Amino acid sequence: MDKKRVLFVCVHNSARSQMAEAFLNALAGDRFEAHSAGLEPGVLNPLAVEVMKEIGIDISQKQTKSAFDLFKKGELFSYVVTVCDAASAETCPIFPGLVAKTIHWSFEDPSAFEGTYGERLEKTRRVRDAVKQKIKEWLKEIT
């Protein structure tokens, strides 16, 4: 059975899309091949790395990637899922070839969180949990 390829896109590819990629590969890696990329790739968010490590998923060695580089290479995906806010999602590229569906899920951007380290960490945990829940719900919908 061929795995369906899924691309998760957010602004910097530093937290939300990285979490979504890791969760889909962990929960359904036998059926899906998840990737992630950003509109303006940045640096992996240490808060995202920490909250994922808390639940046994190590994303510390992941590199941020450009969605536009994937577009230029003609990469093919069954699904492209934007996980940024609505305004940023509007600038996501259209992928040629096999894109069965484009989906938008809105999650807060951990890089915009303010407060103490502990407060920002707790907010990032909430985003992590929301991403995981959304992946689980989506898997139930499509299978």
Image: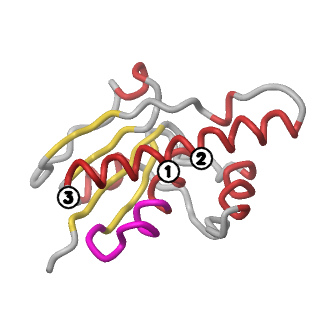
> Would you say the magenta stretch is mainly helix, strand or loop?
helix
Q: Measure the alpha-carbon separation of dots 1 and 3.
A: 17 Å
Q: Quadrant of residue 53?
A: bottom right
Return the residue at label 3.
143
Q: Measure the alpha-carbon separation of dots 2 and 3.
A: 23 Å
Q: Is the residue 119 above or below the residue 15 in the image?
A: above
Direction from residue 21 to residue 43 in the image, left or right: right
Q: Measure the alpha-carbon separation of dots 2 and 1.
A: 6 Å
Task: List x then y, in percent, for residue 33.
Answer: 32, 68
Instruction: Describe the element under mark 1 as helix, strand or loop.
Output: helix
Question: What residue is at 74 percent from the left and 48 percent from the top?
Answer: 47
Give the number of the disc on residue 128.
2
Give the number of the disc on residue 142.
none
Return the residue at label 1.
132
Residue at the top extreme? Answer: 87
Task: List x then y, in percent, for residue 114.
Answer: 79, 25
Between 22 and 75, the one nearer to me in the picture: 22
